[in-house]
Amino acid sequence: MSTEKTKPRRLRGHKDTATCCIASGSRPDVVVTSGDDGRLCWFDMRCREAQLVMDVSEEPISSMCFRPGNEDIIYVSSGKEVKCFDVNLATSWKPLQSYNYNKEDINQIVCNSKSSFLAAADDSGEVKIIDIHQQCLYKTLRSGHTSICSSVQFLPWRSWEVISGGLDSKLLMWDFSKGRSCEVMDFGLPDVTSSSSLGQCLNPAFVHAVAVPEVDMLDKLDKVCAVARGDGSVSVTSIESGLAAPKSKGSLKTRKGSQSKSKDGSSTTSVDDQGGKMLHLDSSMGGHSAAVSCVAFSLFGEKGKYIISGGNDCSVKLWNCSSYFHAGSSSSNSDFLYLNIILPEKVNWLCTRPAETNNLIVCDTSKVVKVYSVT
């Protein structure tokens, strides 16, 4: 493990805190950032300055995503609203569509790979599934989270399922065609094996963010989910054999636990009841000393080789977990952490791009976006 202290490239364009960043899949040099200033900044990484600045909201922008298959279209959430913009019409700053289905402020939006649905997770604990083609509300996913729903992701290998995480410390898998949860994992239940430090023992295991690999990463990673937790750890669990079907014993840092049924018939599983592989990346492995705010799978080099996490301890960590899920739990605790990057501010969000340089983009609590080159 090494610690990165080199001076990053800086992207300027925001007047207030940078909140989110996304990298284009079809145009590898394009990166878009958003901020509390209600602004979108489009950067071409081959250039020094922002190529386009869009003032699209009077409220802070909480999340954004491209429309897969047509990345001239971008979705933006601010307050309770989701807006859709065409970059080719950016000078007008007029949205193509606007969706106002959420009751409370939205925390994350995401499109599925077929560009047919958009999911919006909000402070009420609900997830709204919006039909993009029909431009209407398709389903409301409720009665799952008992607190803020902070993050949501479509499962690219399952057409009708999403996974969500919340500040009730729960990870839920939903069948959104039926509008109900089918599996629940509760990180808030006792799990002494993942509480290796005093801070992680006392801080709640809130789920701040979840990430799932792209389809072309599955041969290396299996069907897993990475979870950024409020107790400073990152949990990586096999969705197919762990969350969906806890049966057998035996995985790194797992123990026999309990399983119960919720009112809607879904099963609730404690973290230590995993039958499949569960990996806890915590302070005993050189992990975060404060809440983890974001997590992502790397797109540079060998796609999915690294899980990247950012936290309130002003650090970004690169974890090499591919060998664990591909070949088994033969690695020692010291083998997982590949790189530690120290920042001057707490991390809000991060993303990666498939390039040899300038491939890790980080939004912290300042208005300047940092760009690192990771090899």
Image: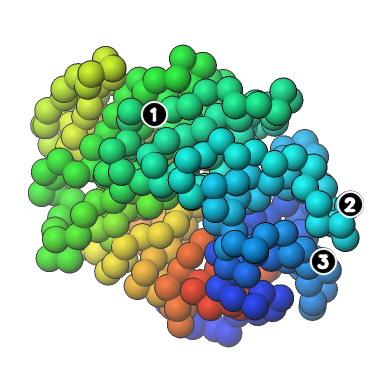
Q: Earlier in the sequence, mark 1 or mark 3?
A: 3
Q: Quadrant of the N terminus?
A: bottom left
Question: Who is closer to the viewer here, 82 or 109?
Answer: 82
Residue under circle 3?
A: 52
Q: Amino acid at mark 3?
A: Leu
**Residue 293 at what x, y percent from top left?**
40, 59
Circle 2 residue: 88
Q: Does residue 117 lie above or below 272 as drawn?
A: above
- Residue shown at the point (48%, 65%) measured from the top left: 348
Residue 277: horizontal and vertical position, in percent?
30, 35
For the point 52% across and 23% down, the residue is 139
Task: Look at discs 1 and 2 and give the one toward the viewer.
Answer: 1
Give the distance between the C-alpha atoms of the residues marked 1 and 3, in whole angstroms: 38 Å
State the residue position of label 1.
142
**Amino acid carrying mark 1 in the image:** Arg
Give the image location of residue 339, x and y in percent: 44, 68
**Secondary element at tag 3:** strand
> Does dot 1 land on a helix, a strand or a loop?
loop
